[in-house]
Structure formats: C-alpha cells, structure tokens
Amino acid sequence: MEKNKETMTIGALSKISGIGIQTIRYYERKGLLKPVTRKSSGYRVFNWDSYKSLRFLKHAQELGFSLSEIKDLLRLRANKKSSCVDVQSRANKHLKGVEEKIAQLGMIREVLSELIQKCRSREVDDACPILDCFEKMEDSHGPR
C-alpha cells in the first residue's frame, strides 16, 4: 500500500512523529492540522500528508516561527500558486525579529556581566549590587 493512501489513528501519528496526542489535538484546534476524516466512532483519521505537515510544523518551530506564522506558511505550502517570494518575505521578517532578539540578549549579557563583576569586587559588608540594581530599575509598567 502506498504511504500517501495509508491512514492512521492519532495514536499511530503520535508514535511515528514523536509528538504527543494532546499536542496533535491542540494543533488541530488551532487549525494547523486537519484529520483526513473521522470514523463513525468519532476517532480522527490521519494520513502520510498529516505526518509531513507535523514535521514541517516542528521544523518551523525549531527555527522560532510562532504558530500563527506557521499557519500562514502551511497555507502558502498548500497553495501551489504561492511564490517563493511570498515565503521569503515572511522569512525575512522573521529573521529581522531574530536579529533584534540577539541584539537585546547581547545588551542583557553585558549588564549581567557588569553586575556579576561588581558583586565579585564588593566589600563583605556592602549590599549586593545585583539586588540594588533590580530595586533601582525603572518600572516600565507602573504600579500594580
């Protein structure tokens, strides 16, 4: 029997994909994955394309794409008229976000390194510079 014609239960799909049943159900609720059909008993029936969609989803997640971005990518993947330019545009936008996060993490690293160094060079009776810094930081959200 051909792989694309084979059907499987959610349990079998979970087993071959390494993705938990609850996660697969969650993806279904979010519109990221659809069963091919349901049996009269209500059981979901999936096929090999379902497995390939799950793999696609996991690989996109590993690259940091959000579920809504992945839903958009899956839509583009299913539409044979979509161009690579459409996908590239989304990838460029995502890359820009990744670069912004990297820059932000670099700043956080510098601040933490400075605070740790201040901690090492403090006198025994001095207050902890890290705790002092956290207390003096501006609250960007205002009082709660």
Image (cartoon, helix red, strand yellow):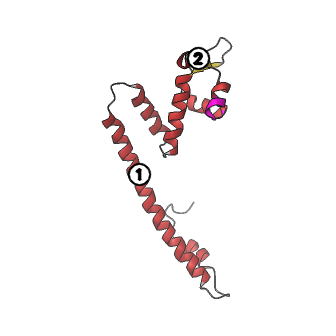
Residue 100 screen position, x and y as percent: 41, 57
Residue carrying label 2:
6
Q: Which residues are magenta?
A: 14-20
Image vertical order of residue 128 relative to residue 10, above or below: below
Amino acid on which the number 2 mark rests in the picture: Glu
Residue 97 numbered tag: 1
Frontmost residue, 137 versus 108: 108
- Cα distance in 3D space between marks 2 and 1: 40 Å
Frontmost residue, 67 versus 17: 17
Tell whether label 1 touches label 2 (CB within 8 Å).
no
Eye-nearest disc, 2 or 1: 2
Frontmost residue, 27 versus 53: 53
In the picture, the quarter occupied by the C terminus is bottom right
Image vertical order of residue 123 relative to residue 64, above or below: below
The structure residue drawn at horizontal position 35% and vertical position 46%, both measured from the top left corner, is: 92
The structure residue drawn at horizontal position 55% and vertical position 23%, both measured from the top left corner, is: 48
Residue 30 screen position, x and y as percent: 54, 32
Can the viewer see residue 141? yes
Residue 49 colored in magenta in the image: no
Residue 82 lies in quadrant: top left
The structure residue drawn at horizontal position 63% and vertical position 27%, both measured from the top left corner, is: 13
In the picture, the quarter occupied by the N terminus is top right
Q: How many marks?
A: 2
